[in-house]
Image (cartoon, helix red, strand yellow):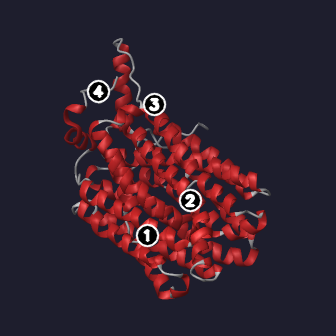
Amino acid sequence: MLGVKLDYNMSPWKKTLIAGLISYIDAGSIVAGASGLSLWQDYLGMSSLQMGILAALSSNTGGAAIGALIGGKICDKYGRKFVYNWALLIYMIGVLMICTATSYPMFLLGYVVVGLMVGADVVASWTFIAEEAPAKNRAKHCGSAQVAWMLGPVVVFAASIPLNAAFGLLGNRIIFAHLIVVAAWIWYQRLKMPESTEWLEAKKHEQELEAQGIKERKVQYKDILHGTCLKTVVMLCAVYTLWNLAASTNGFFMPYIYEHVGNLSNAASLAMTCLNFAVCILTTFIFMYLGDKFNRKKLYGIFSGLGVISWFVWTLPGDMLQTWMLFFFTIVWGFSMQQQFYQLWSSELFPTRYRATAQGFTFFVTRFSAAVWNFAVPLIMEAVGFQVAAAIMIGFVVISWAAGTFFGSDARGKTLDEVTAERYGNEIDKDGWFVTAK
């Protein structure tokens, strides 16, 4: 594409950086809307129902869910590189629609396009990172993508404070526009990256079998919903899906909640949310440092437990909330590590032939569930108050904590092939297929 030569000498860290920056524009597109949600609501005259639909179909939820489901299968069939190159091109078109939106339908359509492409790209990129990372440093490499994810909100919220104050809605349009510039740079850099070696080896073996007259087998969703693979899917959905119901609320609605429930100004709300994601960056560096050295299940239990405690602040009536309580939530919620562990576990706990498909499926379940929940949040807030929604979310994060703490994995230092052999044993044949798959 464009005559760009592949760089076969590219270091693992450079590959991780370029692939992982999708997390920056994923998070950036989520919080860019969040930082200007009140401005867009006033400009477009959005009702609570329309806000719920927007949240349900955004890059944080429904759009990304469908994109991941489709992108995962394409990724296993045609390669990681095929998906993440084309997805970014279409992503830029979606963001451009948001930047220039003058009506609710146009604004919503832009969000849907962005969501679809983010979902497909995240699956391809996260899978690529895990497959190219050295076994002894896999947590470090996977964690670096999460640094990029948390950096997006920090940059966007920090920039939104002066831009929103100075230019109003135009400031938020500028925030969205910068994502196009970043995406264009990432897209060009990715043209130089070779395909995943893990995927190429699996594809080469598949072609050798075809040359011998053995028909190509196809990955089907039913293949990942049995045996050990099903148990892994359930564990990951419990860890990530339920946690993400709270996290997606935090990512999309929290500036609005700080402002309307916590009684903070718009600038203070954005600053508080920015601080939360800055803490998340610190937490990710802790994950990167400890994840390859200490028992991962124990680390998960400690840090995800802090996330559970933080949400109790929002069960208090609005008139009881104090600024220090909001700071407590902001800091402590930032120490939960579910997303870091999800990226690591979903990339290493599935066999190569099924990796992107399985990750896409769990990502779909997660974002689709968030779509339903984010649609309901504004309606719950309007009907009975945010305290009820917060109490429900505490239940979500408690189950997420238990799933990873008791059923997670500690595969430090093992190659992906070693993890697969140990985890699946006789369930996988010599060619890497599930023996029960037809």
Q: Separation of disc 1 and disc 2 at Cα?
A: 22 Å
Where does label 1 land, which residue? 280
Which residue occupies 36% across, 36% down? 224
The residue singled out by tag 2 in the image is 374
Kindly indicate whether the residue at mark 3 contacts the one at mark 4 (C-beta within 8 angstroms): no
**Badge nearest the viewer, 4 or 3:** 4
Residue 156 makes an appearance in the image: no
Classify the position of the N terminus by image quarter: top right
Distance from label 4 to label 2 (Cα)? Answer: 38 Å
Pointer 4: what residue? 436
Mark 1 touching mark 4, by CB under 8 A?
no
Q: In this rendering, would 302 be left or right of 19?
A: left
Image quadrant where one finds the C terminus: top left
* SS class, disc 1: helix
Above or below for 234 versus 320: above
Badge 4 amino acid: Thr
> Pointers 1 and 3 in contact (CB under 8 A)?
no
Label 1 or label 2, whichever lies nearer to me, is 2
- In the picture of the structure, the residue carrying the numbered disc 3 is 77
Q: How far apart are marks 4 and 3 (CA)?
A: 20 Å
Q: Which percent across, then down, holds residue 59? A: 58, 53
